[in-house]
Amino acid sequence: MTQRSVRELSRREFLAVAGAAAALPLADRFAVPTREPKRIRIRSVGLDFEREPLIRPTGFKGGFLTELWQPVARLDSDSGRSHIGIGTQSVLWCDPRVLAQHSESAGNAMMLAVTDHALQMIVGESFTTPIELIDRILPEVHAFAVRVTGLSDLRRTFALNALVPVDNAAWLLYAAENGIRTFDEMVPAEYRAGVSYRHRAVASLPSVTYALPLEDVVQAARDGYFVIKLKLGQPGTQAEMLEKDIARMTAVHRALAGIQTVHTRDGRLRYDIDPNQRYEKKETLLRLLDAARKIGALDQVALVEEPFPDENDEQVGDVPVRIVADESATRESDALRRAQQGYAGFALKGIAKTLSETLRIAKLAHDRKLVCMAADLTVNPVLVDWNKNVAARVAPFPGFTVGMMETNGHQQYRRWNEMVSWHPCADASWRRVERGVFVLNDDFYARSACILEEPVHYRGLVTPSRTG
């Protein structure tokens, strides 16, 4: 399930890393040059994808996935520059109703069709920043997704997930056209405050899905992972779900009893509980948390991610743990609504909802002093480092001196090691987890985790399919 570390961090080394991270200045103390961006016209586009099988069916949101499609979008500009963007599709995460009505492959094909439609829309179009481009096309892209799936109230996340490869390609083309060489410089000036921190370590959160064997969970903790993401919200009625979730939480907590970590003051592990919007009412969540209290786990719950569906308007300020929004915060106005309901912050997901929308939400969190962490979508190794660029630059989560980022691809993909070999910086030290953390050095920041460097494998998949 987990990567074996190359070496273990001693307690002294960890404290040194943590102290350095806490002492690092904000980005306004190392100014990034600002210049007027060029207007870029899209001359041609291309699209292809790969199907990546999973080790075992991965369960969350009341369903299961057996594979994840990896779309690759290509954008060519009038200047002759060309860049690709990579995505990972997760139809189940976006809207489980699609897979309730269609096969897994059909759901993926629908999302890929939405990506293709977005690419066809932008042929001949011009933009200055990717944020401007996504703003312009998102309403029509979502409307097309509604028509394709037949769901009049299709969740906006479906369209955003389909747009990730397009958005990523646009960001890299934008950087190339404007002579930008780092992630910090790539972020437009008005959004830099939200991603202005510089961690020297980021905690890696493994994911405990419904079917993951308990021995794998225990091994992860023994390998040094100290924040365990527990996927709840199991299939069935609300009563059946709650019963199963309490049993799973209890089994995991008991299996991990006695395992210590140097990363927390009390030496105990922490839990990130993620029901993925399956809890319809706050009352049900409070019953889960009461069960956590009874088994002695409540004090170890660092946060609860997105327990309720989008339409739930209940205030959560009285819930005894921090609640952060994920799927429901697809745009700035959504994030503001959740903040007004007492949510403590956001699970940032640029690898699922586009970097363009994520930068806005990160800025809102910074301005309102809300907390952030970075959540996974079981993405490929290249996208892990897109996510790591964000996780490394948001302020520390309360109670932690390092950044926080979920990453579970190594637990789920059958070909994970081969996928790692396609990363432009596959052997970089900051790619490896050491006793539960990614240790970030100057090379990580200087090369922006190599996201601006083209993965040869994925580049070879796609050629332009339409010119305008």
Image (cartoon, rainbow, N blue to C red):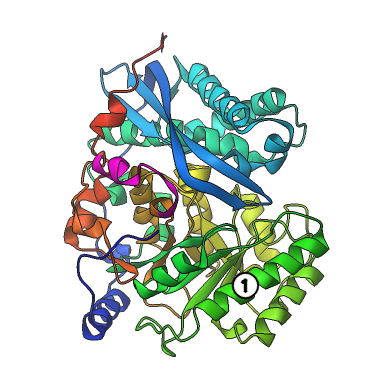
Residue 287: name its quadrant: bottom right
Residues in magenta, as a range: 411-421
Picture layout, residue 270 above or below residue 323: below
Picture layout, residue 153 above or below residue 144: below
Residue 215 in view: yes
Residue at image position (56%, 61%) is: 346
Picture layout, residue 227 above or below residue 129: below
For disc 1, the marked residue is 249
Give coordinates of residue 251: x percent, y percent.
60, 74
Picture layout, residue 382 above or below residue 262: above
Amino acid type shown at disc 1:
Met
Left or right: residue 36 compared with residue 231? left
Q: How many marks?
A: 1
Q: Magenta span: helix, strand or loop, mainly?
A: helix
Residue at image position (50%, 51%) is: 349
Which image quarter is the N terminus in? Answer: bottom left
Give coordinates of residue 71: x percent, y percent.
44, 30
